[in-house]
């Protein structure tokens, strides 16, 4: 067939309207990724600060106690009471280092237990609970230990973001400040309910409490958004519920996939 008999096929042209929509979609996706990066960065900053405070508090106090004994007494003036004080503070330092290692447990099987999670939550927030006069309660409805095949650090951050939010809400409560962890499970998910009796969430933002930048406590509005992002990233979910009783004002229900109930 000669060239002049070939059928003419016009070149396809890009529709500017469709192209513009694609650009807008990409910009929206890029913006969302940026927000997620900001959320993760902020959460890591908070977590690192809590780790530093945890280790520094006990170790610093123990070193100061030992230093006061050594610097104010000669070797002849050291008594049995002084030695017992030094031994006690050395014990505290060893326990602090041991507890610090529990905050990032390592496993060749890439799994961790609920017990290690609750231990980390308690250790990281010990000073926070003490300074803010918060009673931390635990309610365990599990008959066996459960395990997660998830990044330990992310789950700790997720729960800590809820704790931080509750602590801010409790700052306006004069007495009997309480946070409670209640644990249950179904066939596939562990259910972590985190209750507090702090300030209520305003009705107008109840449905937007997990949106980026939305805060009921005067915060950045990043913590709850990041908690929801992590839950959904690992095929879980997080929900908010208001309560009308004398004990608690609200709770957050976190559902995370479990892998088994045996060691």
Image: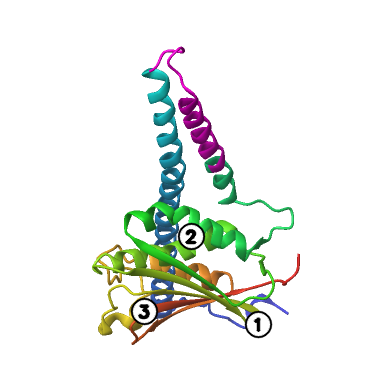
Left or right relative to 98: residue 171: left
Between 82 and 3, which is closer to the camera in this rendering?
82
In the figure, 74 relative to 211: above or below?
above
In the figure, 88 relative to 98: above or below?
above
Q: Residues within 10 Å of mark 3 (few under 14, many from 20)?
A: some
Residue under pointer 3: 248
Find the distance from the CA under tag 1 to the CA under tag 2: 70 Å
Q: Residues within 10 Å of mark 1 (few under 14, many from 20)?
A: few
* Sequence-wise first label, 3 or 1: 1
Find the distance from the CA under tag 2 to the CA under tag 3: 23 Å
Q: State the extent of the magenta-drawn residues as a range.
A: 73-95
Query: Measured from the top left, where is residue 64 in percent x and y?
Result: 39, 30
Query: Measured from the top left, where is residue 58 in percent x and y?
Result: 44, 40
In the figure, 15 relative to 105: above or below?
below
Q: Are marks 2 and 3 in contact (CB under 8 Å)?
A: no
- Comparing marks 1 and 2, which lies closer to the viewer? 2
Left or right relative to 173: residue 41: right
Secondary structure type for disc 3:
loop
Taking the view exactly as shown, the residue that stands out farthest to the bottom is 244
- Comparing marks 2 and 3, which lies closer to the viewer? 3
Residue under pointer 1: 5
Task: Please indicate, yes or no, whether residue 32 appears anywhere in the rendered image.
Answer: no
Give residue 157's mark. Answer: 2
- What secondary structure is the magenta-colored segment mainly? helix
Between 174 and 238, which is closer to the camera in this rendering?
174
Where is the N terminus found, in terms of image quarters? Answer: bottom right
Query: Measured from the top left, where is residue 231 in percent x and y?
Result: 52, 71
- Comparing marks 3 and 1, which lies closer to the viewer? 3
Secondary structure type for disc 2:
helix
């Amino acid at each position: 067939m000669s060239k002049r008999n070939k059928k003419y096929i016009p070149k396809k042209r890009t529709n500017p309207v469709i192209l513009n929509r694609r650009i807008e979609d990409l910009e929206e996706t890029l913006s969302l990724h940026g927000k997620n990066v900001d959320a993760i960065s902020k959460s890591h900053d908070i977590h690192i600060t809590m780790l530093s405070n945890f280790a520094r508090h006990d170790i610093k106090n123990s070193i100061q106690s030992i230093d006061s004994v050594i610097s104010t007494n000669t070797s002849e003036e050291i008594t049995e009471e002084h030695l017992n004080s030094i031994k006690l503070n050395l014990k505290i330092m060893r326990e602090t280092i041991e507890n610090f290692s529990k905050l990032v447990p390592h496993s060749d099987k890439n799994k961790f237990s609920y017990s290690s999670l609750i231990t980390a939550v308690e250790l990281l927030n010990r000073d926070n609970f003490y300074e803010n006069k918060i009673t931390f309660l635990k309610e365990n409805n599990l008959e066996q230990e459960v395990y997660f095949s998830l990044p330990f650090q992310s789950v700790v951050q997720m729960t800590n973001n809820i704790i931080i939010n509750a602590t801010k809400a409790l700052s306006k409560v004069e007495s009997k400040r309480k946070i409670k962890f209640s644990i249950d499970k179904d066939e596939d998910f562990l259910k972590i309910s985190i209750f507090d009796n702090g300030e209520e969430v305003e009705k107008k933002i109840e449905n937007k409490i997990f949106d980026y930048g939305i805060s009921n406590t005067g915060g950045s509005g990043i913590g709850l958004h990041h908690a929801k992002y992590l839950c959904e990233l690992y095929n879980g979910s997080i929900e908010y519920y208001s309560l009308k009783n004398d004990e608690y004002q609200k709770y957050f229900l976190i559902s995370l996939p479990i892998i088994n109930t045996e060691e």
